[in-house]
Image (tube, rainbow, N blue to C red):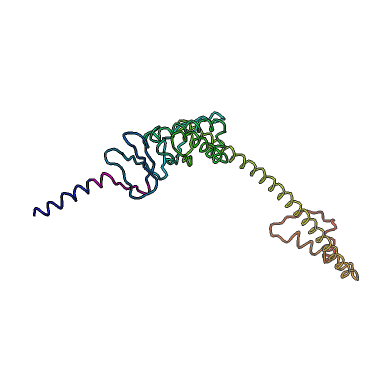
Amino acid sequence: MSRLRFLTLPALVLFIAGSMCLYTVDETQQVIVTQFGEYKRTIREPGLQWKLPVVEAVLRFPQRILASDASPAKYLTLDKKRVAIDHLTRWRIADPLIFFKTVRDEAGARARIDDIVFSDLRRELASHPFAKIISEQREPIMETVTANAAEKTKQFGIEVLDVRIKRADLPEEVQASVFARMQAEREREAKRYRSEGEEEAAKIRATSDKERTIILAKAYEESQKMRGEGDALSTRAYAEAYEPNAEFYGFVRRLEAYRTIMGGAKSTVVLSTGSDLFRFLESAGR
């Protein structure tokens, strides 16, 4: 029992000494080693590392890409419109020593980055109209802001990789008026389209009525012409049929006239007894 206690004590001492002298660097980390507060070295390679116990201290910093999601802010565009911009900045720690000396930690870094990006965004947005900001100029503006922010953050050991606008809207206090104006414009456009449509419909109806009248007139003319030709043929046929006995033809036509005039039961005809109409009746009476 005493021998086991004798072997365990040195092992425990070695374990404590090893834990104070050795440390691991994760692949997502980078560290700087200081000795009594003075910088000694920077380690970016992952693996097992050593340090002097008590004398040296290890400060760890993330090596992965970080993001700074700032709160939305209001900006003024070139055409004097206020716009609410919500942006996102992606960055990483390029020099952990300068980073530690200037901003100390991620919270301090985000505060500096947001101040710089806000300033650059304000300057860039003030030189472009609102319509261009939300359309074709959006990408060039972001590239310019990213380049300017990356240059300014070098002094903090930070490398800005990208700045992106997540959302660009008008402030809530002016959205209602803008939507009302948009609605009025759309209604005005709709009325213009309707009036143009009604005008075009009136033209089409007028053209159709004109063509209809012309077609009916031509059809009536053609029918009258055909009717006249038919009457002429009929008259010619009658003439040819009754030409050998004209007196008989006159008698038949007079009988047809009698039937037409006196055919109705309620018909009343007052004529002179010497009328030529009753010439054949008088002859019949004799």
Q: Considering the image in quadrants, where does the C terminus appear?
A: bottom right
State the image coordinates of residue 273 (x, y, percent, origin top left): 82, 56
Q: Residue, x 47% and y 39% (percent of image)?
A: 160
Q: Considering the image in quadrants, where does the N terminus appear?
A: bottom left
- Taking 228 as reference, is 138 above or below it? above
Q: Residue, x 36% and y 42% (percent of image)?
A: 31
- Taking 245 as reference, is 128 above or below it? above
State the image coordinates of residue 144 (x, y, percent, origin top left): 54, 37
Query: As drawn, which residue projects farthest toward the right?
Result: 244
Q: Is residue 263 left or right of residue 131?
A: right
- Taking 24 as reference, is 250 above or below it? below
State the image coordinates of residue 203 (x, y, percent, origin top left): 70, 45
160 and 89: which is toward the camera:
160
Q: Residue, x 50% and y 32% (percent of image)?
A: 120
Query: As drawn, which residue projects farthest toward the top?
Result: 80
57 and 132: which is toward the camera:
57
Question: Which picture quadrant has residue 37?
Answer: top left
Q: Is residue 132 magenta?
A: no
85 and 280: which is toward the camera:
85
Question: Which picture quadrant has residue 227?
Answer: bottom right
Which range of residues does the magenta coloring cover? 17-28
